[in-house]
Amino acid sequence: MALSLAGKTAIVTGAGSGINLSFARLLLSKRCNVLFADLALRPEAQELVSNHANTSQSSARAVFQQTDVRDWQNLERMFHVATEEFDRIDIVCPGAGVYEPPFSNFWYPPGQPPSTDSRTSNHYALLDINLTHPIRTTQLALSHFLSASKSSSPTSKSPSLKSIIHISSIAGQVTPLAAPIYNATKHAINGFVRSLAPLDKRLGVRVTAVAPGLIKTPLWTENPEKLKLVTEADEWVTPEFVAGVMTTLVEEETVEVEAGAGGSGLSTGDSREGTRKVAVEGGMILEVAKAKVRVVEQFNDAGPSGEGNTVGNMGLADEEIFRRLV
């Protein structure tokens, strides 16, 4: 039986654009309130928030909270605002992320433009955004969920399932030379999510992740340097498709995945040709390619392949790196 999202509340970081915006939009369509936590909103995100500013306009509300995910006080603040606005939090998606940007990049060391990482700051902004922020947000979410559970009325029903959903990447398995720090963060996210698998059965907090391939978002389409790496043979994965898989991990008890890959999860025996249904469980990581979803195994995994998982001209980025090095 699906878990109804109506009347529930989600915090989504990075909801101003891309996959996180698509996820927020889908949640709102299911009557789930959403706090958009981002530095700024793209016009389409601003319109969505405006159209859900109050319940007289729609069945769910959206609130924008300007958030720098590198700032832990900002992260704490978004939980306070969500509680003040909606009186509950059920779903947390620490989705904000960047792909080895020039301002924080292994191949542009701190102190060397275009990097804005300081040689004296002792940290990389890329790690703060892609790894430290999801870890700290998960910590805050777990603390909030457990605190709310303890303070609930003794006569109230058992607390509903809470979800924390992360955005990993196929870079959690593959390792392109052009993005070593990004690759490291996604490998780390996979390990982090798997570590928290026991929270599902013991505490009712389901921690999962999606691992998308080549996603048609502004991160690629509005970046000429990245866009030139994509060939006509490469296939895009839509953010809407990824958002649909994320919603399944949050609200469903089973998910339909590729039949031939991935043995984890309890098979339900209900499947279509080429697919099978498995139980959704804490620690699950789902690769999302073009019209294909696959369980990413912890051991002996075949790795990503097929449409939506290729960037044909990645070698151009490699050659540019070697030119700079020598």
Image (tube, rainbow, N blue to C red):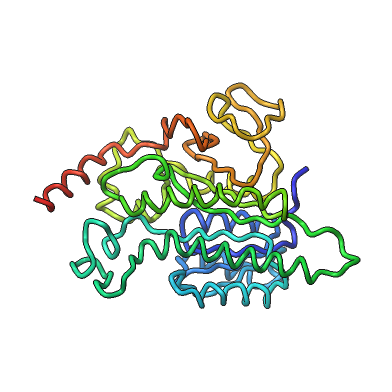
Q: Is residue 29 left or right of residue 299?
A: right
Foreground pick, 306 / 150: 150
Q: Residue furthest left?
A: 326
Say which of 83 and 239 sits in front: 83
Q: Position of residue 72 (x, y in %)?
A: 49, 74
Q: Position of residue 205 (x, y in %)?
A: 68, 55
Asked which quadrant contains residue 155, the reply is bottom right
The N terminus sits in image quarter: top right
Residue 266 figure quarter: top right
Which residue is located at x 66 percent, y 31 percent? 277
185 versus 279 height, above or below: below
Of residues 21 and 109, the one nearer the viewer is 109
Question: What residue appears at the point 60 percent right and 61 percent down from the top-left corner?
Answer: 92
Q: Is residue 113 visible?
A: yes
**How far across and how far down the image is residue 144, in percent?**
66, 68
Is residue 15 visible to us here?
no
Identify which residue is drawn at 26% across, 48% down: 178
Q: Where in the figure is residue 140, as x and y percent of width and height?
A: 59, 68
Looking at the image, residue 22 sits to the left or right of residue 160; the answer is left
99 lies above or below 103 = above
